[in-house]
Amino acid sequence: MASVPFLKTERFTLRPLRREDTAALLPTFADGGQSLYLTRPAFESEEELAGWLFDPDWNGRTWIAEDAESRVAGRFVAVPGLDEGVAEIGYVVCMDRQREGVARECTAALVRHLIEGEGLRKLTAEVDVENTPSVRLLERLGFTREALFRQHEITHKGLCDVAVYGLLATDPLP
């Protein structure tokens, strides 16, 4: 697995995940409303969340966004795609930091790093079509909806339609 380099934005540092981040992430991941678009229900304990965050079989990388006061603002991930040069991204902003532009600022930095810094040719993101804020974010960052899979996934909330968004290295970057 590739390393997780530190990335800087105007307001945040994106850094590797640490065990102590679990406590800061738990209020968001334990909230049913905040976890609505995860593929699993809300977490019930710090231990359960830590087991998921640090699953040794997961092949992705996690960046934690923290502000100048070292407060955790969100989790950002990149997972290798099926083909070389492709990765899927994901993000969760802590509920007490939503509507501050955290997702846009940090996802844009991650996108630029993955394409310009690591030389990936394409990024993708899968999103429940009912997750309007995530859809808007991807579109603002220049991602294009490439596919719609109707009734594609059964999650804790039921049957979901899933849209796949893509951004090519040749597209304008955020």
Image (cartoon, rainbow, N blue to C red):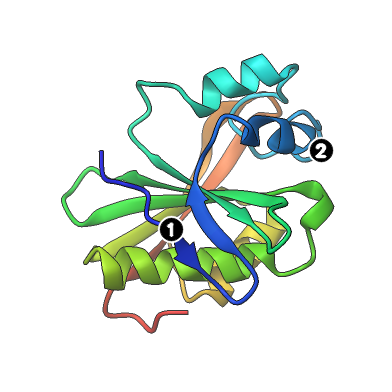
Is residue 115 visible to us here? yes
Residue 132 placement: quadrant: bottom right
State the residue at coordinates (73%, 59%): 69
Residue for point 57% across, 26% down: 154
> What residue sits 35% from the left and 21% below the top?
57
Residue 139: image location, x then y, percent: 55, 72
Counting from the top left corner in percent of width and height, residue 23 is at 72, 31
Closer to the chain start, of discs 1 and 2, is 1
SS label for mark 2: loop
- The three-letter amino acid code for the residue at tag 1 is Phe
Q: Nearer the viewer, residue 91 or 50?
A: 50
Where in the figure is residue 157, as x and y percent of width and height?
A: 71, 28
Asked if residue 145 is positioned above or below residue 38 in the image, the reply reads below
Q: Is residue 41 above or below residue 28?
A: above
Crowding near the residue tagged with mark 1, few <14, some 14–19, many ≥20 C-alpha atoms within 10 Å: few
Quarter placement of the N terminus: top left
Structural crowding at the residue carrying mark 2, measured as other residues with C-alpha within 10 Å and reported as few (<14), some (14–19) or many (≥20): few
Q: Is residue 79 above or below residue 55?
A: below
Which amino acid, mark 2? Gly
Q: Which mark is residue 6?
A: 1
- Disc 1 vs disc 2: Cβ atoms closer than 8 Å? no
Query: Is residue 92 visible to us here?
Result: no
**Point 79% across, 65% down: residue:** 99
Looking at the rendered structure, which numbered label has been put on residue 33? 2
In-front residue for pair 44/37: 44
